[in-house]
Amino acid sequence: MTAENTLFAIAQEVQSCTACNLHKGRTRAVPGEGPANARIMLIGEGPGYHEDRQGRPFVGPSGQFLNDLLAMAGLRRDEVYIANVVKCRPPQNRDPEPDEIATCTKLFLMRQIAAIDPAVIVTLGRFSMGLFLPGERISRIHGQPRLVNGRLIVPMIHPAAALHQPQNRPLLEADFRRLPEILAEAERLHKQASFLSPQADEPPEQLRLF
């Protein structure tokens, strides 16, 4: 099965999923969107009001800001794959609960990552960062690429948090402007060796690019 077919099949499963309680309040599930061969994958927290209505990730105010951030990195939205940790909107935009994260991640997100096999994963916010770098703090490591199981993970502040706390906006903008250099480094590592093939239980390694 091609990556495109795999992602389509996952999206179909997401639309009819009843594996956790989040499905009870959703208008539309939000599987994710982007090209199957995307070299960069961005992972947010969960759908908000606008995403729940449209069935697409990052289409509200934080999504408009994300589009601007991608432009700062010389990227177009249709060049990256955008997904969330959970695929249905939590009630009143509350934090997703651990069982919801575990269920949705196992059923869908990790399969999406495997199908796309991106060179770089940008985690937006603490919940997606926690999947790859548990115990870390965004305030300490934002923008610093880490090699996790053969893939570059770049933790970043969530665009919504930067909108609500203006002091974080310059930090997030600066981190996005570094993305081309980070992607180039990921491609260089890939050419040197099979760094992008999953390796079992390797501790995160900080890359000193900057």
Image (spheres, rainbow, N blue to C red):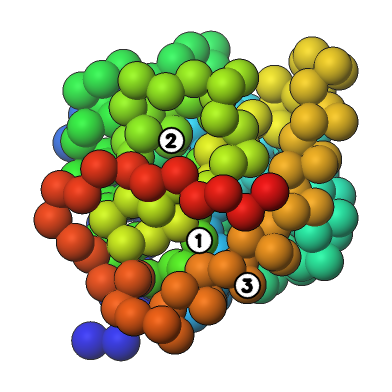
Of marks 3 and 2, the one in the foreground? 3
Relative vertical location of residue 69 with respect to residue 158 in this rendering, above or below: below
Q: Amino acid at mark 3?
A: Ala
Closest to the observer: 151 or 125? Answer: 151
Q: Total marks drawn?
A: 3
Of marks 3 and 1, the one in the foreground? 3
Q: Quadrant of the N terminus?
A: bottom left
Q: From mark 3 to mark 2, how far is it between C-alphas?
A: 23 Å
Residue topped by disc 1: 120
Relative vertical location of residue 199 with respect to residue 54 in this rendering, above or below: below
Q: Residues within 10 Å of mark 2 (few under 14, many from 20)?
A: many
Of labels 2 and 1, earlier in sequence is 1
Instruction: Please give the name of the residue rendered at 62% of the width and 61% of the height, measured from the top-left corner.
Output: 182
Q: Say left or right for 32 vs 174.
A: left
For label 2, the SS is helix
Residue topped by disc 3: 184
Q: Is residue 102 visible?
A: yes
Closest to the observer: 53 or 101? Answer: 101
Q: Amino acid at mark 1?
A: Val
Q: From mark 2 to mark 1, how far is it between C-alphas?
A: 14 Å
Instruction: Please give the name of the residue rendered at 86% of the width and 31% of the height, measured from the top-left corner.
Output: 170
